Image (tube, rainbow, N blue to C red):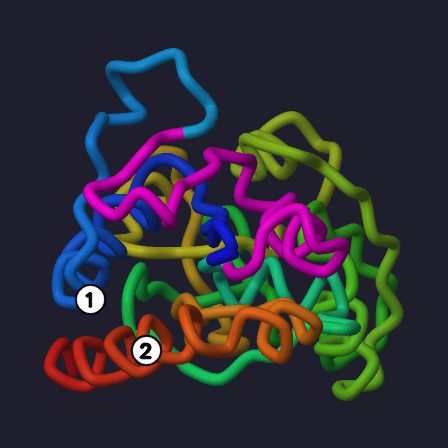
Amino acid sequence: MTQMLTLALSKGRIFEETMPLLQAAGVVVSEDPEKSRKLILPTSDPLVRVVIVRASDVPTYVQHGAADFGVAGKDVLLEHGGDGLYQPIDLNIAKCRMSVAVPAGFDYASAVRQGARLAVATKYVNVAREHFAAKGVHVDLIKLYGSMELGPLVGLSDAIVDLVSTGSTLKANNLVEVEHIMDISSRLVVNRAALKLKREKLQPLIDAFDKASRREK
């Protein structure tokens, strides 16, 4: 019996930028998740389906075998830890950067140099903790799930660590990027058991993703 493959994707940019890679693998998703209320979408291949989950949940679905493979940002994988996941390909999609930002006029260089404690609001506490620890800066990390930019504006934090794409949201809220932590893109993640048990169906898709992502560079 041929087994069904389940691909976990999040709505938005990752979904949109994964579509050309899927099409290159000969698979077309039959419905638009922005217009459909369905969380499980069929595709042109009866043995491949897409499940729509929160971006931060993609690694969990794949790790526990609820999805055989998925696409997740490097930021999500760093926070998740990536345990039990095979990460064969950087797909070079959904590119952005992880940065430190502060209110315009805040003397970040001086604050860091003096070794003062910084209050930092972020969704990415592991990345932020490692970044500031490597610099020898003491930080109080405040975990937020959205609208990081609000933190410094209302006195919750001195700085934020967040993803930056164009920088327009920072600018609109009178914040400036003061430090680049790392570049971020999305990766293909694969369940290790699925790679063994469903290799015949899964490996050609992985290879097609790899080939298509190289063209995207």
Q: Which residue is mark 2?
A: 204
Q: Viewed as shown, does residue 189 lie left or right of 132?
A: left
Q: Quadrant of residue 131?
A: bottom right
Residues shaded magenta: 41-69
Q: Is residue 48 magenta?
A: yes
Q: Earlier in the sequence, mark 1 or mark 2?
A: 1
User: Which residue is located at x 51 percent, y 47 percent?
Assistant: 103
Q: Are marks 1 and 2 in contact (CB under 8 Å)?
A: yes
For label 1, the crowd category at 10 Å Cα-Cα, with few meaning under 14, some 14 to 19 and many 20 or more, is some
Q: Viewed as shown, does residue 217 lie left or right of 156?
A: left
Residue 3 image position (x, y, % from top left): 51, 55
Q: Which residue is mark 1?
A: 25
Q: Amino acid at mark 2?
A: Pro
For label 2, the crowd category at 10 Å Cα-Cα, with few meaning under 14, some 14 to 19 and many 20 or more, is few
Q: Secondary structure at mark 2?
A: helix
Above or below, 182 against 59 in this view is below
Residue 69 image position (x, y, % from top left): 52, 61
Q: Amino acid at mark 1?
A: Ala
Q: Secondary structure at mark 1?
A: loop
